[in-house]
Image: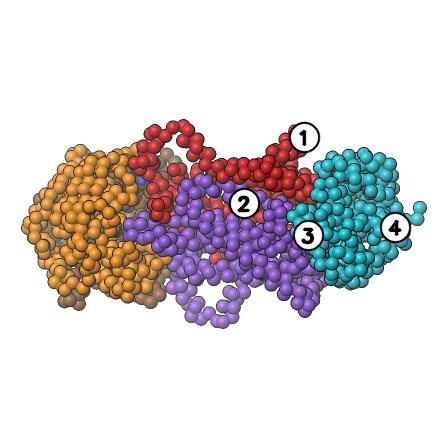
Chain colours: A brown, B orange, C red, D purple, E cyan
Amino acid sequence: MTIQALEKSSFRRITTAPRRPVLPQTSGGVAVTLQNLHKSFDHTEVLKGIDLHIPAGQFIAVIGKSGCGKSTLLRLIAGLDASTKGEISIGSGGETASRIVFQEPRLLPWAKVIDNVKLGLTGTPVRDPDQVLDLSLVTLDEVGLENKRDEWPSALSGGQKQRVALARALVSHPRLLALDEPLGALDALTRIDMQNLLEEVWLHQGFTAILVTHDVSEAVALADRVVLIDEGQIKLDIEIDVPRPRRRGSAILAEIEGKVLDVLFEQDPEKQAG
Amino acid sequence: MTIQALEKSSFRRITTAPRRPVLPQTSGGVAVTLQNLHKSFDHTEVLKGIDLHIPAGQFIAVIGKSGCGKSTLLRLIAGLDASTKGEISIGSGGETASRIVFQEPRLLPWAKVIDNVKLGLTGTPVRDPDQVLDLSLVTLDEVGLENKRDEWPSALSGGQKQRVALARALVSHPRLLALDEPLGALDALTRIDMQNLLEEVWLHQGFTAILVTHDVSEAVALADRVVLIDEGQIKLDIEIDVPRPRRRGSAILAEIEGKVLDVLFEQDPEKQAG
Amino acid sequence: MTLSENFRLRSSSASSPSAHHESWRRPVRTILLTKARPWILPVLLVAAWQAAASAGLIPPYILPAPSAVLGAASGLIASGELFDHLLVSSARALGGFVIGATIGFAFGFLNGVSKTSEEYLDTTLQMIRNVPHLALIPLVILWFGIEEQSKLFLVALGVFFPIYINTFHGIRTVDRQLIEMGRIYGLSSRQLFWRVILPGALPSIFVGVRYALGIMWLTLIVAETIAASSGLGYMAMQAREFLLVDVVVLGITIYALLGKLADTAARLLERHYLAWHPSFQVH
Amino acid sequence: MTLSENFRLRSSSASSPSAHHESWRRPVRTILLTKARPWILPVLLVAAWQAAASAGLIPPYILPAPSAVLGAASGLIASGELFDHLLVSSARALGGFVIGATIGFAFGFLNGVSKTSEEYLDTTLQMIRNVPHLALIPLVILWFGIEEQSKLFLVALGVFFPIYINTFHGIRTVDRQLIEMGRIYGLSSRQLFWRVILPGALPSIFVGVRYALGIMWLTLIVAETIAASSGLGYMAMQAREFLLVDVVVLGITIYALLGKLADTAARLLERHYLAWHPSFQVH
Amino acid sequence: EDALTEFRIGYQKNGTLVVARQQQKIETALEEKGISVKWVEFSSGPPLLEAVNVGSIDFGTTGDTPPIFAQAAGANIVYVATQPSPGTGSAILVHQDSEIQTLSDLKGKKVGFTKGSSANNLTVEALIKGGLTYDDIEPVYLSPADAAAAFVRKSIDAWTIWDPYYAIAETKQNARVLTTGEPIVATNSFLLANGDFARKHPDTVSRVIAALSEAANWAEANRDKVAEALAEVTGVDLQSQARAAERASFGIYPITQDIIKTQQTIADRFYEIGLIPKKITIRDAIWNAPQS
Ligand SMILES: Nc1ncnc2c1ncn2[C@@H]1O[C@H](COP(=O)(O)OP(=O)(O)OP(=O)(O)O)[C@@H](O)[C@H]1O
Ligand SMILES: Nc1ncnc2c1ncn2[C@@H]1O[C@H](COP(=O)(O)OP(=O)(O)OP(=O)(O)O)[C@@H](O)[C@H]1O
Ligand SMILES: [Mg+2]
Ligand SMILES: [Mg+2]
């Protein structure tokens, strides 16, 4: 029953014709390779040797307990922090347009909603103001907020802010997109809409996607591959070999989800005993 | 399989003996009555006549789509904003200790984690510094962050911040506690831990709880009653007449969840048609 | 009335019930009264002063009555002298302000953005800041002579520091999270500056501007002791020299009004450029 | 080197690979060099000046060489005169600072917290701020006489405004979300002030303090023209009257060093009280 | 002699210079040499000499004491002419109701004057005449404007001051004259020039002195007009300016041995009471006028 309800709205977007133009320059994703990646803060080692190869254009989901180092990993990949040890190589060298949706919305408080979205297009080949506005409006519409285009961010609800941040990322034609719990503040319905939007844009543009999420079913439904981080290392790394479009709630996805959850709950045997 | 995994850790806390003292002064919850509550911002009417009576000590969950006015409602109840029209009456008059867990953590950046938790005890009869520290440490331990007690909030992960904010609220012995998506940034496992903690403390202290959440199964599992807000009005108001301790994933809860989701997805027929 | 209620928490609540009612019924008279509020205290002070003078409590050669000051003013206005002084001083003030503010902003920006530059420059600037203009005048005459340059230099120097310090502070405390975001979204240095750093530092920069607009006039009076024969500062100091107390008081009054003018300008700028900021929204 | 890289994004990254290595191997010499950086520019300036003077490019009656200034200094130190002047001035400076800062803080707090109070008072204060001390001196003598009070008054007045303006701004821009939180968590007015408002306004208040520590000395030189017979300002202004250029330059140098001292004090305070703030963490 | 195109003269608002400026005496005198004149106003002697010293202006007038300090400081300044005054234009004032009747009553009193000014010298000499020493009074160093305020407030008991403040105080501030400067010490004024300038352009200096002398002669003969002119430019009331003009002396003369001696006495006195750090010889700073 639940699942039928979900299904009703589930594939809406995939079936509509893609409205967004593909820029000729954005030719798919880049590969990301992490070798023996370590990261320590003052007293604690958060990442203790991460080895991971993400092929170009893969959609990978990263899950793990709160505080396990997911955001830290994304920051390292994005080059915002330097690793304590280890190597990160992205693409074939040269400039790579990578974008993050941060865990907080990080909207510019002094820019109206539409200008925050437009910001996603700086540094891209889209320069023509009309085209910038068009693309931004289309994306803002896709996240359901066209009517908020001229509001200050402070007048948005929590979920609305998150969606604006998502729009800013999706409009930007990245070759690598890292998303840090981008849908955490959304209700079930909006969430599914946004998941579909994300999948659609990804299919369309072919960027490499790294999605941090705490919702295992979301990870399983969207990603080609799910990676579980625990105690600073990769504990689980499975391919989700299910063809798209995927039917949410299908037996195969449920089974994979169950498997992942099992590993997730097993990882803390001491606590379970207590 | 999923459900078994969940169950494994589910009732851990309820079975342990309550460690937290009950303060004599905190004698249960207060009733909240909203009459024809309206709230407009500059151009838009967000709440369009909410009538709701929450009996003292009830655990009520509020759900609704992103931007439907849930946070706005909590702010009105807490007296942070004034309503455009309508009446709010809380308890039998006089001072009521009400607390909010905001949608953002709102930790004081200049106070260490432990001091942020201690803040929850200001305005309560707990004055003795030792007792304040003890209670705060116990609560910090309950949210799994005792080892972060001397960190600045800026050194916490997103989920850790949210848990500190939760600890600050739970330590405070309120008579009315409003929680605005308090577990939004938590992984499945930590989330269940926190749900259990919340239920435990509520059972123990008997405050009136208003939980805004976007997770319908969470609402159904924790609350006595679920209210759905749509288009500024209450669209659904059902009692969850299931005895506690509740078994997550039990047929009865799943059925209620399905019912709620049905209403949730039906509320937007136009979109579904599109 | 507790602090927390008093604190403008509800700044954006034009929709609070009472405010709502008020704006409904509020007659024109009330609105005028609100506008007049800032002037109540100054008017009271002047009235008390006139009363005391009229009652003979203050001998006129010590502190002339406001009416006497007005008399002096009308004399100077009629002869066109006051206007000339104001014109000359305004040109000096604005010229110095533009120079000082530009350089102050540039250094504030540089040191706010680059730790290295801060290490090399900040100490020196803080040391120069502490040198009184009065003591510096001999050197200023030496370097810039006794013409307009020396006056412009002093005003620029005075204006420099509040702009520098507040720009520095503003840029230094821009939300790092937003800068990270800008960087990740491929903003060029220039874009990062215009779209993130400058708007973020603006509230603090405006504090500097507001302060500098005052300092501008304060320095000018020192500058206009250097071989000047016109200007507001010259007028005031000359009057002081020759014990023309009414003109001295007139000078003080004009300074005060100029201060009010500059402040109003700063407020308008704030209102326009900080419309997004909850603390600066019109209530 | 782009702006974004330059901007101290990685302020907290003592753990960046290079920094890590450096702190490993960095010899004592390098650390000393880092400490010395702020002094490089001043030392260069003084060296250039001495060279120019030694080469006979600047006649000593116009600008004496640093060595001559040192000579004047050693004379004044030997006679104990310099120390006396410093002592007297410091007492005045500190006294005035304490008074002015206290009142400035109080008004800044009041107007930051209460819109009503701001409406009634701010305009008047901004007007007073714009009145030059030099023009005010005759009135100050009339009100406060020629003793210490008048000097304290002037210093306090000078210190008042930067503290007032920055406190006002700091309190006004404290994160409203945190204040709401404090209110909801039942903080009393006093607790709200000490735990939320003051810490939130502190970075801005420190800017005011830093600026005021400079203004303190600047005003003192004006104040010490009133019937003083000791004090640093008296020394400098007398030397100017008597064309003792070496003593004037010595005075300037002492002011600069005092500025450095005050600035260092402000920095230490910042480092201690703003340890939580990413922008103020030691790098 | 280098070609000179502009002559820069610093002045304070006193009689001879204001008259010369109004009547364009210097302009006329220098016109035929193709030299223009620039007038630069100063509020007091020391900053004027500051500017002469660094060469920002070429020429100026001050009272008797600023050049002493300038010379002690090694400034590049020479005396070129004098405007002798017997001291009628300065006085020691007390309040009308003051108990101070004679100079010796000043013992233990607060006496206000500008440090290092001719009033400082007058005070010292007056004390000697009254049988007192500098240590017997409490000196309060105040600029004229500040002293006026302090006198009104009775923060000082006596005030040594010169015209026009002296006249203003008499007419407006209820002051009584304890003694004028006349029986005690002369208060000459001087025309001074930058040393290099005087050496290079002696002819110009001579012409300027002659022109100023002409103006002075006119002023001597038209004291009422001078008072009017001064009242006009200073804003001080005519009554006080007339009183000051009446007792002023305007004439300009070459520097004589007598003048040098008077000036040397002041310098020695100042050295004695520690106002200047070393002994100086006035004669060293006297300009040698070209023999014509
Ligand atoms: N600047 C810092 N200084 C010290 N410790 C830090 C810092 N940033 C993060 N940490 C610590 O590193 C660990 C990992 O943080 P991170 O933000 O990567 O977690 P996360 O996996 O994103 O968690 P969440 O799901 O709660 O967001 C946490 O324990 C956190 O306390
Ligand atoms: N200060 C404001 N000014 C104008 N509009 C506002 C303001 N605050 C909220 N709103 C609008 O009111 C509506 C309700 O906001 P609210 O924050 O209550 O939503 P919510 O139900 O909490 O949503 P979410 O689940 O996304 O947090 C939103 O459409 C929002 O844009
Ligand atoms: Mg995170
Ligand atoms: Mg919300």
Q: Estimate the spatial distance between the alpha carbons at disc 2 and disc 3, rounded to whole Å.
A: 30 Å
Chain at tag 1:
C
Q: Quadrant location of residue C124?
A: bottom right
Tell me the crowding category of disc 2: few under 14, some 14 to 19, or many 20 or more residues within 10 angstroms, Cα based: many
The secondary structure type at the circle numbered 4 is: loop
The label on residue D129 is 2
The label on residue C79 is 1
Q: Estimate the spatial distance between the alpha carbons at disc 4 and disc 1, rounded to whole Å.
A: 42 Å
Is the same chain shared between marks 2 and 4?
A: no
Location of residue E74 in the rendering, given as x and y in whole percent from the top left corner: 77, 58
Q: Amino acid at mark 2?
A: Arg
Label 4: which residue?
Answer: E255
Q: Quadrant location of residue D38?
A: bottom right
Label 3: which residue?
Answer: E156
* Front residue of this view, candidates E43 and A239: E43
Q: Is residue A220 visible?
A: no
Q: Is residue A257 left or right of residue E41?
A: left
The secondary structure type at the circle numbered 1 is: loop
Tell me the crowding category of disc 4: few under 14, some 14 to 19, or many 20 or more residues within 10 angstroms, Cα based: many
Q: Given this view, does label 2 or label 4 mark the residue nearer the observer?
A: 2
Q: Estimate the spatial distance between the alpha carbons at disc 2 and disc 4, rounded to whole Å.
A: 50 Å
Location of residue B88 in the rendering, given as x and y in whole percent from the top left corner: 22, 41
Residue at horizontal 11 percent and vertical 58 percent from the top? B7
Location of residue C168 in the rendering, given as x and y in whole percent from the top left corner: 48, 51
Pointers 2 and 1 in contact (CB under 8 A)?
no
Quadrant in which ligand 2 is drawn: top left
Is the same chain shared between marks 4 and 1?
A: no
Q: Estimate the spatial distance between the alpha carbons at disc 3 and disc 4, rounded to whole Å.
A: 37 Å
